[in-house]
Amino acid sequence: MKADIMPKKRINVELGERSYPIITGSGMASSFAAACRRYRISDTVVIITDRNVARLHLKPLLNVLRGGKFKPLVIVIPAGEEQKKLESADRIYTLMLKKKIPRSAAVIALGGGVIGDLAGFIAATYQRGIKLVQVPTTLLAQVDSSIGGKVGVNHILGKNMIGAFHQPVFVWMDAEYLKTLPKREMICGLGEVIKYGAIWDPGLFAYIERNLEKILKYDTGALRHIQFACAAIKAGIVSMDERESGIRAILNFGHTIGHGLESAGDYKILKHGEAVILGMAGEASIAKKMKMLDANSFEKFLSLIRRIPIRADLKSLKPGDITSAMGRDKKRVDKKLRFILPVKIGKVKIADNVQKKLIQQAVKEILKGN
Ligand SMILES: NC(=O)c1ccc[n+]([C@@H]2O[C@H](COP(=O)([O-])OP(=O)(O)OC[C@H]3O[C@@H](n4cnc5c(N)ncnc54)[C@H](O)[C@@H]3O)[C@@H](O)[C@H]2O)c1
Ligand SMILES: [Zn+2]
C-alpha cells in the first residue's frame, strides 16, 4: 500500500457536540479505513458516488475499506446536477432498504458537490438520520460544499429548495483527487477560492495572484495551500454561524449576481463557479460606484478575475433575465436583494440598499466583458 505523500493537517469545525475534524493532505487513501475506525464508523458503510469518480477513484478506497474489515455497499449514479433530485434519493433509499442497511451504518459521500449534497441528504433522512462522512473530490467540494452541513436536493421550482443541516462525522480531504479534475471544474472551484481571499484573507488573495499559473497546472503544493486555507476559513465561519443567521451570509459574495447569471442561462451556459467569478466582478463594480471600495482595490479584483480563463459564451444571456432571476434567489431578504459588497480586499459588508440602476449597469458590464 502506498504511504501518505505529505503529512496530514487537521482543521476543527467547532460546533459543540456536533464538532468534527477536516483531515487534509495529499495521497492519503491508504489511511482512510483507520480514520473511519478512529471516528467510530461502524462496519456497514454505503459509498455513494458518481460514474466519473467511481471510474477514477473508487477502487483504492474500496480496497482499503475491505482490508479494514468494513462491509461497503457501493451505489454509483450518473454524474451531473440533474441527479440532485428527490427521485434519485428515492431510488437510493430503496436500494439501502432492500439491503437492510441499519441505522448504525454510515454514508460515505465520494464525489463533488452534487454527490455531497445528495448523499448528505440521504444520510440526513434515511431512518431519521445516519452518520455521514464527506470525501470531496472536486476543488469546489473541498473548499466549500463538504464543510458546514448543508445538504439537499433541487426542486423543479428552485435549486437546493429541499434539504437539511446534517454535519458529517469527519471530512476527508485528499488533494490527490484534484489531479484528475477537468480544467473547467478546477476553474469553478477557483471561483470560491478567490471569494475566500476577497471576503476574509488578503494573504490568500495575494497568494492566488502570485500562484495562479501553478494552481492551474495542478501543482500539489499550491493545491494543498489553497485547500487548507479555504477549508480553515469556511470551518471558522461555520463554527460562528452554523445556520446562516448572521456572518455565514458573507460566503455569498459574488453569488447574488452569480445566481442571476447561472439561472438566466438555464444552468447550461455558466457553471456555478464561473458565474460566481463574474458575479464578484459585478459586485465589486457596484461597491466601487457606491464609494465603498477604492479604485485601486477594484482594479486588483478585476485584474485577477481577467486572468481566469472562462470559456463560456455569454452572448445569449439577456440583462433582463439576469436581473429578474436574481430576484428569485432564496437568499433575498423581505423582497429586497441582498448584496455582499467588498470594502477592501479581505473585508465585505452586507448591503440591502443597492439601487436597481447600479445592478443593471454591473450586469451590462459583465456581458460586455469589462
Ligand atoms: N452544500 C453546500 O454548502 C454547497 C456549497 C456550494 C455548492 N454546493 C453544490 O455543489 C454542487 C456543485 O458541485 P461540484 O462543482 O463539485 O459539481 P459536481 O459534483 O457535479 O462535479 C463536477 C464534475 O466533476 C466530476 N468529478 C468529481 N470529482 C472528480 C475528480 N476528482 N476527477 C475528475 N472528475 C471529477 C463529476 O463527476 C462531475 O462531472 C451544486 O449542486 C451546488 O449546489 C453545495
Ligand atoms: Zn458558491
Image (cartoon, rainbow, N blue to C red):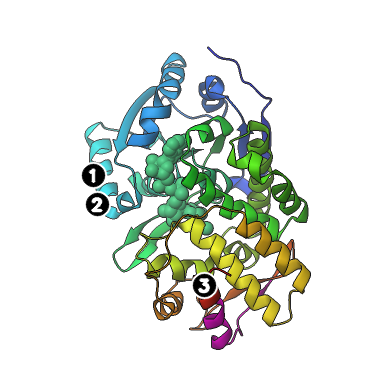
Residue 167 pos. (x, y %): 52, 47
Give the magenta range.
349-362
At horizontal 53% and vertical 71% (from top left) the residue drawn is: 366
- Precedes in sequence: disc 3 or disc 1: 1
> Who's the residue at 67% across and 60% down the image?
303
What residue appears at the point 58 percent right and 50 percent down from the top-left corner? 190
**Position of 231 relative to 1 (above/below):** below
Q: CA distance from mark 2 to mark 3?
A: 40 Å
> What kind of residue is marked 1?
Arg
Crowding at label 1, few (<14), some or many (≥20) Cα neighbours within 10 Å?
A: few
Indicate which disc residue 315 carries. Answer: none
How many numbered marks appear? 3
Q: Is residue 210 above or below residue 274?
A: above
Return the residue nearer the eye: 306 or 287.
306
Quote the CA–CA distance across marks 2 and 1: 6 Å
Q: Secondary structure at mark 1?
A: helix
Chain-order first, disc 2 or disc 3: 2
Q: Which residue is mark 2?
A: 87
Label 2 or label 3, whichever lies nearer to me, is 3
Q: Which residue is mark 3?
A: 368
Q: Is residue 342 visible?
A: yes
